[in-house]
Amino acid sequence: MAIGKTTGGAASGENVYWSSSPAETRDIAAKLAATCSSSTVLALRGDLGAGKTEFIKGLAEAMGCQGPITSPTFAIAHEYTGGQLPVFHFDFYRMEDEDEFETCGFEECLGTGVVAAEWADKFAHRLPPGTIWIEMSAANPSTGDARHRIAIGGL
């Protein structure tokens, strides 16, 4: 199935994509990777299972990063190298307060590679201007829709 893109019903400035598989989610992220620079900050939000880690995996793979790309839920941060730019992958899910944010290394990574943060809404006030927000929604079996919605704003 082809990746679907719509703009109807999207908030101003959002591009909305529909994914039917992890591979399609990675393909959507790969398209975004082509526009990234060392100052790109991506803020991902969405429920568990919405595909946030899969999206970052597609982004890092498209940028040529080497090694396994996995969720940093317990480590808080992973760095993927070997590609056009390093990708710094943060997961704020388990972080509880400002002190944890201060010591996670997020701000030190800004401007040195692509920074992508899952559960970014927990510290939205700490993200720099120009952050690209990615809102992800899991499939809705109650309506029979098996696709995931990926809305990318700020492009």
Image (cartoon, helix red, strand yellow):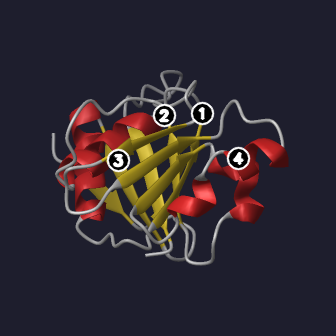
Q: CA distance from mark 3 to mark 2?
A: 12 Å
For residue 2, side relative to residue 18 (left or right): left
Q: Residue at x 21, y 56 (%)?
A: 63
Q: Tell me the amino acid under the disc marked 4.
A: Thr
What is the spatial separation of the Cα atoms under label 4 and label 2, in whole angstroms? 27 Å
Viewer-closest of 23 and 5: 23
Q: Which residue is mark 4?
A: 103
Residue at point 16%, 51% (across, down): 64
Query: Do the CB atoms of the residues marked 1 and 2 lie less than 8 Å apart?
Result: yes
Mark earlier in primary sequence (4, 3): 3
- Kindly identify the amino acid type of the residue bearing the numbered disc 2: Ala
Rendered location of residue 86, percent (x, y): 32, 56
Quarter occupied by residue 48: top right
- Quadrant containing the N terminus in the rendered view: top left
User: Can you tell which mark lies on residue 18?
Assistant: 3
- The circle drawn on residue 50 is 2
Q: Nearer the viewer, mark 1 or mark 3?
A: 1
Label 1 amino acid? Asp
Question: Mark 3 or mark 1, which is nearer the start of the sequence?
Answer: 3
- State the mark number for residue 47: 1
Residue under the point 49% across and 26% down: 49
